[in-house]
Image (spheres, grey):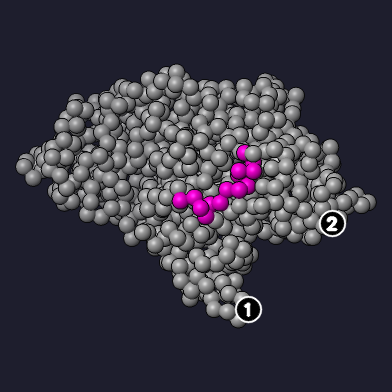
Amino acid sequence: MDSRREPLQALAGVVAGPYGPGMDQARKLGLSEVEELYAYDGGQDSGVVDKVLALLDRHAPRADRRQLGIFLELLRWRLGTLLLCGRDCMHGWLGAPQAFVALSPAQREAAVLAWVRAGSLSQIKAWTGVKKLVALCLMSKLEADGSSRAMRALGFPIRDPRSDPARTERAGRAEAGLEAAICDVASFSAASATDVTALAARLRSLGLQPVDPARCAPPGTPAALLAGAPHLVLSADVVVVGSGAGGGVAAAQLATAGLRVLVVEKGAWVPVDAMTQQEDEGYSALYEAGGFMQDSRGLMGVLAGATLGGGTRVNWCASFRTPEHVRREWAAAHGLLCFTGATYESAMDAVCERLGVRTGYRHSAMCRSLAQGCRELGEPVSEVKRNCQVDDCSSYCTLGCKLGGKQDSVRAWLTEAVDAGARILTGAWAERIVTETRGSAGRPARVVGVSLRGGSPGTKGHGLRIAVAARLVVAAGGSLHTPALLLRSGIQGRGNVGRHLHLHPVCMTLGFLRSPPRLDAAVGLAGAATPPLPDLEDRGGRPASDHGSVQLWDGTGMSTFSAARGDWEGSGYGSLLYTPQVLPGSVLSSMPWLGQADFKKYMARLPDASLFLTIVRDRGEGSITLDGDGQPVVNYSLSAEDEGAMASGSAFAARVAAAAGADTVMTLDADPRCRFLFVDEGAGSGVSVMNGEVVAGAGGTPSLPAQLAPEGPASLLTPADEAALALGNAAPASGSGAAQARHPAFRRWLAEREAGGIATRRTPLFSAHQMGSARMGTDPAASVVDAEGQSWDVAGLYVMDASTFPTATGVNPMVTVESIAYMLSSFLARKEAHQTRTDE
């Protein structure tokens, strides 16, 4: 048996153990599904641990697996547990230490609470990783009959009810043309001569001409290209490495211009009919490292697409043109005058038209809670333009769109590229760009092709090897993989490759609402008239009263935002406030764990939760380096200035949540000090109100969601709630959200949170936007590529993705990436056409 299983099972029981008082209350109210949720014991659910182990083995980097393996092994033994848990593992005051797996549930919980409060970085990292995996897998695990007790209790449909078979079939037909142009290299084995022959046959069926160099090397093939002993050699005019926002546009533009284009994608092609809409499976199939990629310290999650279509396949559809203040900065500070000219403006116009960028969506309850809170405070709020053709989608969009509405790279660009003759290799990662020293145009080297390997990136001695001879290479692997590819290829860019990384760091705030947000007035974008925000019941889903006031997974997400803390009229650096498209497992995996009672209470209240994202336009920079397998490592820490912007933005998010009518507001720090309660005085609530202040009483039991227990108090108390009350982090609930946000106790709490900064060891941070790391400029000493996207050092090597950004944009970068790729690939197509005419 896997030695990790027993300690993982014990930790799963700590994450989500049974809670008796909640079960008793649910039973009295006749809420059998909620009672079942409170009774659930992760320590007895081997299916969840099976999923956790599978995700670890498939996606965790080797070093992280080793560190977690040591941590889990220590928990199997007395001395190891003594080292990690101290006195909490003792049997009696003077007794012998016990192994963690042999401790009582109460002792295990006490030990983990000690890690949360004052553990070492390694303890916090290990526990947080396990908690995230268990929470995600708990919400993804289905019973034999296809049901889920957790999802049933939360009123969460296992699959999007909008994605009926007819709509999925229509969406699939729109992408069907790609199938005939794709070869999945990962499905062939280098160990089998039969597979090599079969791969060659498949490539020939695509119109490619593979050659076995062991039999007959193609005439004129550079020796450097054959140095890796490839199994097959191909040729193309252009190899585009990456198929996301930059690669898709470049492939379409260059193929349409008549060039022979080969697109290389390390991820798999996941058609709409293969999207299961289960969180663990979706993240595993569509995201980098299964959605669990982190920075080198393990303190920031890094979300990036890793499938055909890249991040555009899974993003939340926000489609911002490059802000004017960013374009001016790039022109003035970096000499890139193209960004303030008509050419780039035309590129943005073309991209937005192709993507169908628009407003006028039906806003989810979560988006409307942001709008309502801002309105109550008199703060600006606007609509987010999106590239979706469906008026009322849902958070399942983050696992790929089965409705056919999202205009991702596959639909908008790659289908056009294929129609123009481009071909696509999936399951093939670019090991290195092959160059020779016979340079041109003042550059010391020139491209001769790309060396590819089939299978998982980083595998050594495995995977089928393919060499592609090409005179042009477009690196479009994004800000994580483009610098990694350049570094593996020995291209340093005078030390600039991998530097100047920006992540748009994000922190989160939760507000638990008693009642649905309701707005009648329009939310205007830049003064434009827009449709009114409809009532929650008008969204086409079930009435809100059935399962929660918000249902954060339901309805069009990320359709409203506030730039109140963005400083767009000043420095252009600050933060924006959004609500995301998100599913329950993702929220649960990020929620603070402050004991089993607290975790179960707020898990049961997820239907009432509105999640607010504070996204910082970071001045600070990180870097990309390589690990021992040649794969990218993200090195990043918040600068003091960016931490201040995040703290200010997080305080604003909390104000908006309170003004929207939240009864509980919390940041996601695992600390009771980061929680504020707006409470009603009521029998059994354990609190009273005297002279407008909250006074703690005898305590209480964990609450059920208010809408599930209409005759009970809206919020009873867990130990963490009681700790917040003892700190004075409470105020009387008010029918006016603005009054709640103005209460002196709440304002004091906000000031303390803002002054205290961001406790990064306890606060879940993440990045969904990676930029920089191979930036564009006019000075070879300070940039990697010139204003046309060509490497300063290697002729024929171009970069067309977010890594070219000189600085962060502060908004979703998709339209900016596609516009840059459109502009640069247009330059390149014209240059090639001119060269062809000259040669003739």
Q: Is residue 751 visible?
A: no
Label 2: how many residues lie within 10 Å, few (<14), some (14-19) or many (20+)? few
Give the spatial CA distance, label 2 vs label 1.
Answer: 32 Å
Label 1: how many residues lie within 10 Å, few (<14), some (14-19) or many (20+)? few
Q: Classify mark 2: helix, strand or loop.
A: loop
The residue singled out by tag 1 in the image is 93
**Total marks in image:** 2
Do labels 2 and 1 touch, CB within 8 Å? no
Q: Quadrant of residue 633?
A: bottom left
- Quarter of the figure that contains the N terminus: bottom left
> In the image, is residue 187 part of the stretch drawn in magenta?
no
Q: Height in image: 422 above or below 573?
A: above
Q: Which sits in the foreground, 615 or 779?
A: 615
In the picture as drawn, the residue positioned furthest to the right comes out as 691
Q: Quadrant of residue 454?
A: top left
Residue under the point 84% across and 56% down:
697
Q: Quadrant of residue 661?
A: top right
The residue singled out by tag 2 in the image is 697
Q: Is residue 157 left or right of residue 243?
A: right
Q: Position of residue 17 (x, y in %)?
A: 58, 54
Q: Height in image: 273 above or below 211?
A: above
Along the polypeptide, which appears first: circle 2 or circle 1? 1
Q: Position of residue 252 (x, y in %)?
A: 35, 28
Q: Is residue 31 visible?
A: yes
Residue under the point 63% across and 47% down:
38
The amino acid pointed to by label 1 is Trp
The amino acid pointed to by label 2 is Gly
Q: Is residue 776 left or right of residue 265?
A: right
- Name the main secondary structure of what is drawn in magenta: helix
Q: Height in image: 326 above or below 422?
A: below
**Mark seen at residue 187:** none
